[in-house]
Amino acid sequence: MLIKARSIAEEYLRKHLYKSAYFWAEKAIVLSNGELQDVFLMAQVLYASEQYHRASNLLQRNSQYQQSSILCYLLAKCHAACNEWEVVLTVLSYVNLEATKKVDRDLSKLTDIGNVESSCLLLEGVAHESLGTIPKAIECFTSALKADVFCFEAFDHLTSKHYLTADEEKKIIESLPFNKQCTHDEESVMLYLYQSKTKGCQKFTNGLLPESCKALENCSDVLCSTAEKKNARASYSVTSRLLQQDQFNKSAILLHVSTCVSQKKSTELYALGQRLVNNFPELPIAWYTVACYYLAISQYADAAKHLEKVLSIDKMFPHAWLAYGLSFANRGEHDQAISAFSNAAHIMKGSHLPLLYLAREYFHTGVTAISVGFVKKALAMSPTDPIVLQEVGFLLFHAGKFPLAEAYFKNAIVNLQAADSSSSPMWETVYSNLGHVYRKQGKCKMALEMHKKALQIDPGNATILADIAFVSLLMDEYEDAVTYSTRSLQLRRQDHLTLQILETAVKQASQVCVLPSAAEDQTVKQVKSDEDRMSTSTELLIGRESMPSTSSSSFHSDMASSSEDYFT
């Protein structure tokens, strides 16, 4: 009868009929007088039915769990489900694979659970991550992956939260013992799947997948990984298709939210947020989507409120920390923004984005030296990223180093072209800023060309229209100056700078006054001084490599003169 009771309990467990499974598992324990095999079976039933405290009490009775690493692991999982992370680490400290080898082997044969070394290391990493000890978590995840190269969850923890730089990700993949744990074809598949999720792998090696596994190119995680490396419009097309097939695909949702924010699809964000909150109110991604909707419509206080809820559920959600910082940055609350971005930087040690946001906030507060230091770190980490190059050019402009700023903006354009980012809002920003740099060097014709390219991308931008009007005024093209300044004022009526441009251009065009007086000459100088402004990066992506940036406003403050000492 003991064997029959075990068999029935296991069958009902597989059928997810937990009440029946518990009924017969209890009978098996009584009949066997509490053998470990039956204790483990009942604990599994209790865990599967979300009765974590009962499972924990069962395993701890008479310290039975210390006799087996498998039981220790299940007990630790029970405490993890209750968010008792300190207890998890305590329980896992009892794991001694060598001492419990015989018991584990016998239990493994009966339960078909296999070796739990990698699982214990993974769970230890999750515990350290939840407690905020990121370096220790990285160490545990790496060890778990080396113990079992098929443990994707460990690899996902390392890559999805940007714990590692591109070089570090590459080194970890190269260090994995594929040849010891996989066949040749399996190794090719594993390399393809893991490399598709790394930062540095823009193009996958042709022929890496065996012919029999080519269909893996259409897996949702592979499609999401490739979409992240495309422009926003192409990424949106991929994620939309994936969400039609599986409307609750978490990987696709995160990237889809990013592309929706980038393209100002607030209606779609609203609908997606409502659907997620109604079905999964316990998941942080649901409230994060709602927060991004409020960011997209510039309701920053509401965005901050919902992001606080996200972080109360998962304080290690890096995208939420960045968005939380932006909700303050866009309201001019720089100290709170710096605090949020610092938390993001603590988590995302392998990403340059928190560094750029910190640089921008310190620039706003006038601490130039720290701002430059963060930009330098970001540049060292990602020397070809257009957003980084744009920010370096911005700082160089305000440091008065216009030829160097020009070089960085041109480099940003080259890398945007290489990344096939034809629909990126970065184009308008870089063209506008390059136009300002040309103007400061007296290259007005080239400046006008850049501003007009920016206008083609964003025809309704009042700032770009004013920029064209001002350059036209400098080139003595007074009619154009009047035309463009008038168009700008139709969109932004009370802008004092544009009004000055229009007033001066009208006087020149009518030949009433050709600025003969020192006072009028001073007016033009004032216009030039006021116009020394640069657009910030407007990349509004919230996916793996890009996060929401500030709105398309301009910086009006000048870089402190001491900043010149920081660039060579």
Image (tube, grey):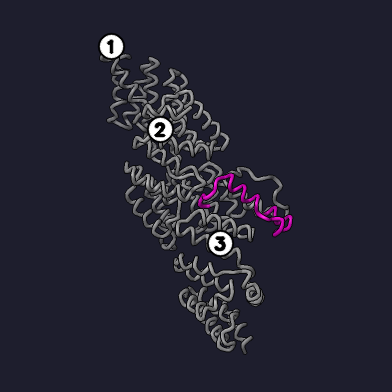
Spatial distance from mark 1 to mark 3, Cα to Cα?
A: 77 Å
Above or below for 552 versus 150: above
Q: Residue type at mark 2?
A: Ser
Q: Secondary structure at mark 3?
A: helix
Q: Nearer the viewer, residue 247 or 108?
A: 108
Counting residues from the start of the chain, the first of labels 2 and 3 encountered is 3
Establish if 154 lies above or below 8.
Answer: above
The outermost residue toward the front is 99
Image quarter (top left, top right, bottom left or bottom right) of the N terminus: bottom right
Residue stretch in magenta: 160-189
**Could you classify mark 1 by the number of other residues whose Cα lies within 10 Å: few (under 14), some (14-19), or many (20 or more)?**
some
The amino acid beneath tag 3 is Leu
- Residue 211 in percent (x, y) is at 73, 52
Label 2 to label 1: alpha-carbon separation: 33 Å
Q: Quadrant of residue 165?
A: top right
Position of residue 138 relative to residue 387, above or below, is below
- The residue carrying mark 3 is 122
Q: Residue 376: x and y, percent?
A: 48, 36
Drawn side of residue 514 relative to residue 355, left or right: left
Mark 2 and mark 1 lie on one chain; the one further toward the N terminus is 1
Q: Horizontal and vertical percent for residue 429?
A: 44, 33
Residue 313 visible at all: yes
Disc 1 secondary structure class: loop
Task: Reply above or below: 266 against 409.
Answer: below
**Amino acid tagged 1:** Cys
**Closer to the eye: label 1 or 3:** 3
Q: Which mark is residue 513?
A: 1
* Helix, strand or loop at mark 2: strand
- Which mark, residue 535? 2
